[in-house]
Amino acid sequence: VSIDARNSAADLEDFPLAITQIQDFDVRVIFLDAASPTLIKRFSETRRKHPLSTQEMGLKEALNVESQLLDGLAMMASLKIDTTHMTLHQLRDEVRDRVANTTQSTTIMFQSFAFKHGVPVDADFVFDARFLPNPHWVPHLRPFTGLDSEVAAFLSAEKEVNGFEQDLINFLETWLPKIIKSNRAYITVCVGCTGGQHRSVYLVERLAARFEAQNHTIQTRHKELLQTIQPKADLQP
């Protein structure tokens, strides 16, 4: 079942009630979103008319109205996916990977990103690692990423990095169990740095390894590396 701005206002208002009436089933609400400039580009490329646009309302205004209409549905979503930087094939794989787990356990997605490209709209928690020592400014480390042992060795030797990592662990170990008890199907934890190549990637791998060792269902995604990769053995805490 799908729903969007083409449905009537009454349909959108009735949706929350409809969901509560079928709670005996395994119901997951997946909300797809993208940045407005990306949506405008997509409509331009496909030459499709937005369902809310009229002679009096341009595309940008129609997108704003659509966002307001669907805001309540977004709040109900068990999974939000930011499609801004995704191709159709990447979106297909993302949905398939995120819903592949059919058990009732909560899936924790750890995701790295670049602040220069914006904060992921599907984030439940966002942590800023830009204040940490940056391997980008170490010439021999610049070509590597946070997945590589050379960068891991550099960052793991920094007191600030270790302290920040432990603070993140303490925070998440305190609050994630409480969120999981609320029957959330997915929780997305995002760590960002300037370019999304080194610090955020390293920390995401470390956090994923930590919580995977605690028998949580874990997924990782590195937005700037354009692929989903599981934690490496040499990054285990």
Image (spheres, rainbow, N blue to C red):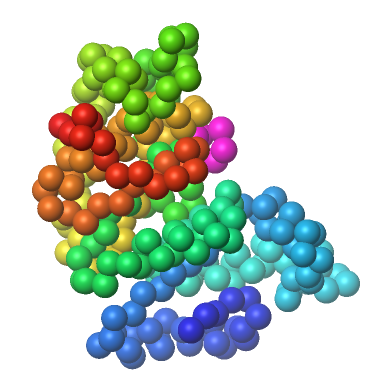
Q: Is residue 3 above or below residue 40?
A: below
As for residue 22 lying within the magenta part, the answer is no
Image position of 198 (left or right of 25): right
Q: Residue at x 59, y 55 (%)?
A: 87
- Count the marks: how many? 0
Residue 18 percent across, percent down from the top left: 41, 88
Image position of 236 (left or right of 77): left
Residue 83 percent across, percent down from the top left: 55, 56
- Determine if residue 74 is in view: no
Q: Which of the 4 quarters of the picture holds residue 206?
A: top left
Residue that protrudes farthest toward the right in the picture: 55
As for residue 118 lying within the magenta part, the answer is yes
Magenta segment: 114-119
Q: Quadrant of the C terminus?
A: top left
Q: Is residue 182 above or below residue 193?
A: below
Image position of 221 (left or right of 161): right
Q: Residue at x 73, y 74 (%)?
A: 52
Q: Residue at x 26, y 17 (%)?
A: 153
Q: Residue at x 20, y 52 (%)?
A: 176
Q: Nearer the viewer, residue 150 or 32?
A: 150
Q: Is residue 101 above or below residue 145?
A: below
Residue 5 percent across, percent down from the top left: 63, 76
Residue 26 percent across, percent down from the top left: 29, 81
- Determine if residue 164 is in view: yes
Residue that protrudes farthest toward the left in the picture: 214
